[in-house]
């Protein structure tokens, strides 16, 4: 059957085992909750759609709870107890958690709340769609309450760092009239257990707050709500002045406080379950509290107080830094987040969450974990990831991101010499915080593939899975996605798995090896090689490459002191060149091109080899994909082939540009004689 591209991994393609399992399937759905449009109502529709699509089986939805055999029962635990007397088998669930049992001839899907019941329904359908008919009973709960996505959508319908066409939320300065696409998006998000969407750019336009736009946001929120997805917005800190007619936006000024309170109340009239605000303040030219000599915490608390009566949350971004002077050996943009936020620990209201990019710079192909996670004991935190591949090939290069994200989520910061995984810090567990979680910049658009590339959707899928359970394995999540998206065929699964698991290392090899951050153009496009663009400017993404040496000295003993921002065990590891892993060497140390790595190679030879290896791997993706020609529908086969062919060529551009650049700079020949003119 022709598939609407917008279904992503929710295709419900006909099962090759349909005949064999048809008789074991439930023949009706018993819903425990109300008939109004709600997550449980949506869950019932989804069950009908899934069973129809996968097995060609029509099932009715009923409220009657007579004979439960051969049924799917779906609803909240509370309702189940009311109807069936008890739910003693179900362990205590956390908010949004669910219990799924497919044993015997009844399937029971019980959520702690309606949202949980919907999540459980998607889980059950995902099993069936993957040909998994095993009998299971288990409960699962989220790692953290905040599992959000961020959109960098502008009011004019463009998307900052978006590679999937136009905004699905805005056009011509206003909220779109038709929320259909928003509703389809919410369905995808619910299936990966995302519960909040910030719909507009962190570089926010104050015109979002016009009465007409607030009404429009209400329409989008109405489209999200049945899927258990809450809407939130980014604010421009100067709005009281820009659109409110006030002469100031000082966060302690009474008229400013009154203005934000009034706007917030108005928003909640239209969106009673609004998730909260996202704030980018005093960063990259955005206005903020520092203009009035107020602290970032005072700025955040302004919104926290306005939101508190409504139950909303402030996500306050830690991405604050200044332009720097490269001639200062001690200057370091990587130091900024801890310098700005550490001393504010304890000063944020309880409904503020500091949202921290995974690394100290900016979504680079390899960064050490942001040390800020280990410096805030009395502040709730969330990690910020990026699904949209800004520096990572902009959806024209295949880069499966979970292995990168896991280097941070699984990182043990050893705060107070105790186990302190980032995933346990953002869950709130490590420092006993009430809030926390994840946000990812997603930037899907009107493209039929959402992100502009079929393969890139794996990153959105896996992001949701990791936000729920950071211990999930990148390869097994990937294989679930492959089965749901492409096929149950072993060959398809193995080939795509191989491509994806090699993709981040390959991209790292040719775009930013040994912890150099990135060699992509940072001044204009953030795309393609430009190893000269990092230096001689104030952005602080320096390589400090000259004829003899390369790398940033971030040690305490001789450099910027960044390594000292980590708790002692980690600080020592990075301070010492012998215990710094090769893949972060140039992040922490300034060395000769002839410096020997732990691998035994010199730095310069590693550059040459990595660039040739990375490009070779990217070229092999084409052949691998071609081997699947008869197993993938021609539309998707060709679209992917086009992108892989592009990547294969562009990886050679990368290889030659970077290898020649360092050959020219260092004058050191390639041992294998590939680089330069011989
Ligand atoms: C990056 C990105 C910007 C974005 C900024 C942010 O620098 O290039 O487009 O506004 O991050 O995260 O705020």
Image (tube, grey):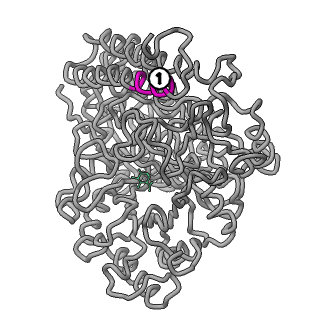
Residue extending farthest bottom: 254
In the rendered structure, the answer to whether residue 579 lies left or right of residue 533 reads right
Disc 1, SS: helix
* Residue that numbered label 1 is attached to: 659
Whether residue 218 appears in this view of the structure is: yes
The spot of residue 666 in percent (x, y) is 55, 26
Image: 382 above or below 579? below
How crowded pointer 1 is (Cα within 10 Å; few <14, some 14-19, many 20+) is rated as: many
The spot of residue 3 in percent (x, y) is 20, 30
Asked which quadrant contains residue 376, the reply is bottom right
Residue located at (48% from left, 91% from top): 254
Image: 602 above or below 269? above
Q: Is residue 295 magenta?
A: no
The spot of residue 336 in percent (x, y) is 60, 58
In the rendered structure, the answer to whether residue 495 lies left or right of residue 59 reads right
Which image quarter holds the N terminus? top left
Residue located at (25% from left, 53% from top): 158
Q: Indicate if the residue with disc 1 has its beta carbon within 8 Å of ligand 1.
A: no
Asked which quadrant contains residue 582, the reply is top right
What are the residue bounds of the magenta stretch?
A: 654-664
Residue located at (54% from left, 55% from top): 145
Q: Which of 325 and 109 is in front in this view?
A: 325
């Amino acid at each position: 059957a022709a598939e609407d591209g917008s279904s992503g991994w929710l295709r419900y393609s006909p099962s090759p085992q349909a005949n064999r399992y048809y008789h074991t399937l439930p023949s009706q759905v018993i819903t425990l909750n109300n008939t109004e449009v709600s997550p449980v109502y949506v869950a019932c529709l989804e069950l009908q759609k899934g069973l129809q699509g996968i097995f060609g089986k029509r099932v009715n939805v009923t409220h009657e709870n007579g004979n439960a055999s051969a049924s799917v029962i779906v609803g909240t635990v509370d309702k189940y107890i009311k109807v069936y007397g008890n739910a003693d088998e179900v362990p205590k669930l956390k908010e949004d958690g669910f219990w799924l049992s497919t044993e015997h001839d009844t399937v029971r899907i019980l959520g702690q709340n309606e949202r949980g019941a919907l999540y459980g329904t998607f889980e059950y359908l995902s099993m069936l769609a993957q040909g998994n008919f095993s009998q299971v009973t288990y409960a699962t709960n989220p790692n953290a309450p905040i599992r959000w996505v961020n959109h960098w959508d502008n009011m004019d319908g463009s998307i900052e760092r978006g590679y999937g066409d136009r905004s699905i939320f805005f056009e011509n300065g206003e909220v779109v009239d038709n929320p259909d696409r928003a509703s389809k998006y919410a369905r995808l998000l619910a299936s990966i257990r995302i519960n909040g969407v910030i719909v507009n750019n962190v570089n926010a336009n104050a015109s979002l707050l016009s009465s007409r736009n607030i009404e429009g946001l209400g329409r989008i929120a109405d489209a999200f709500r049945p899927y258990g997805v809450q809407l939130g917005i980014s604010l421009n800190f100067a709005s009281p002045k820009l659109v409110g007619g006030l002469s100031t936006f000082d966060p302690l000024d009474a008229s400013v406080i009154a203005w934000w309170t009034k706007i917030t109340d108005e928003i909640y009239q239209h969106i009673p379950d609004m998730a909260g605000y996202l704030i980018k303040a005093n960063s990259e030219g955005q206005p903020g509290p520092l203009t009035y000599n107020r602290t970032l915490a005072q700025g955040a608390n302004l919104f926290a107080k306005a939101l508190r009566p409504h139950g909303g949350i402030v996500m306050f971004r830690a991405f604050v830094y200044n332009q720097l002077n490269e001639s200062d050996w001690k200057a370091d943009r990587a130091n900024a987040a801890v310098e700005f936020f550490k001393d504010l620990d304890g000063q944020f209201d309880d409904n503020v969450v500091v949202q921290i990019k995974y690394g100290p710079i900016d979504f680079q192909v390899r960064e050490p974990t942001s040390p800020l996670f280990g410096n805030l004991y009395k502040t709730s935190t969330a990690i910020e990831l990026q699904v949209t591949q800004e520096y990572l090939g902009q959806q024209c290069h295949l880069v499966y991101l979970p292995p990168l994200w896991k280097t941070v989520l699984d990182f043990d910061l050893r705060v107070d010499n105790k186990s302190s995984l980032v995933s346990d810090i953002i869950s709130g567990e490590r420092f006993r915080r009430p809030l926390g979680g994840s946000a990812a910049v997603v930037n899907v658009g009107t493209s039929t593939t959402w992100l502009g590339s079929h393969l890139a959707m794996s990153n959105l899928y896996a992001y949701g899975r990791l936000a729920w359970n950071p211990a999930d394995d990148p390869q097994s999540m990937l294989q679930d996605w492959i089965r749901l998206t492409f096929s149950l065929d072993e060959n398809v699964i193995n080939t795509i798995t191989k491509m994806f698991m090699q993709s981040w290392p390959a991209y790292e090899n040719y775009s930013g090896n040994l912890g150099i951050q990135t060699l992509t153009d940072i001044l204009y496009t953030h795309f393609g090689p430009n190893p000269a663009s990092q230096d001689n400017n104030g952005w602080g993404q320096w390589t400090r490459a000259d004829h003899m040496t390369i790398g940033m000295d971030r040690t305490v003993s001789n450099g910027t002191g960044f390594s000292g921002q980590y708790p002692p065990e980690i600080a020592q590891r990075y301070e010492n060149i012998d215990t710094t892993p090769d893949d972060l060497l140039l992040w922490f140390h300034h060395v000769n091109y002839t410096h020997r790595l732990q691998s035994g190679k010199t730095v310069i030879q590693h550059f040459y080899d990595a660039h040739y290896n990375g490009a070779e791997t990217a070229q092999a993706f084409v052949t691998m994909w071609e081997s699947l020609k008869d197993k993938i529908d021609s539309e998707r086969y060709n679209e992917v082939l086009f992108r892989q062919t592009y990547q294969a060529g562009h990886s050679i551009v990368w290889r030659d540009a970077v290898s020649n650049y360092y050959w020219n700079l260092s004058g050191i020949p390639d041992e294998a004689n590939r680089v330069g003119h011989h």
